[in-house]
Amino acid sequence: MGIGLGIFLVVIGAVLSYGITTDIAGLDLDAIGMILMIAGVAVVVLTLVLMMVRRDRTRRPVQDDSDVI
């Protein structure tokens, strides 16, 4: 879900920054687009880091308890 949200933010930011040429009074669409793209990349990176941390945490050595009856 986090990766999808990040990609969505990057796409919306790119559309606002590069795709829309209309000027709206009081809004800088280029700046808003860049902020959304940076936020999207940050979400993707953070999600990948958290996934790697969880993955390493779930690996546990297997204990051989063949002596236990």
Image (cartoon, rainbow, N blue to C red):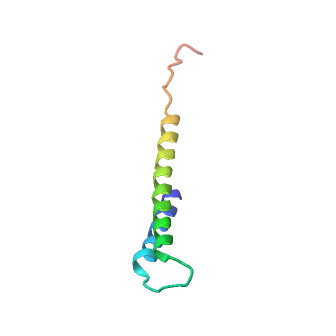
Name which quarter of the figure residue 69 lies in. Answer: top right
Q: Position of residue 55 (x, y in %)?
A: 49, 40
Q: Residue at x 48, y 67 (%)?
A: 8
Image point (39%, 76%), residue name: 18
Q: Position of residue 59 (x, y in %)?
A: 49, 33
The total number of labels drawn is 0
Residue farthest along the left direction in this orientation = 18
Q: Nearer the viewer, residue 9 or 60?
A: 9
Q: Which residue is at the front of the view, 16 or 61?
A: 16
Tell me: residue 8, above or below residue 27. above
Q: Along the line of sight, which residue is nearer the eye, 26 or 59?
A: 26
Image coordinates of residue 61 in percent, x first then y, are 48, 26
User: In the rendered view, would you say 52 is above or below 61?
Assistant: below
Is 34 on the left-hand or right-hand side of 68? left
**Residue at horizontal 44 percent and vertical 76 percent from the top:** 15
Residue at the limit of the structure toward the right, as seen here: 69
| Residue 41 on image: x %, y % | 45, 58
Residue in the image at 46% along x and 86% along y = 22
Q: Residue furthest top?
A: 67
Q: Residue furthest front?
A: 26
Q: Is residue 54 above or below residue 33?
A: above
In the rendered image, the vertical position of residue 23 relative to residue 59, given as above or below: below
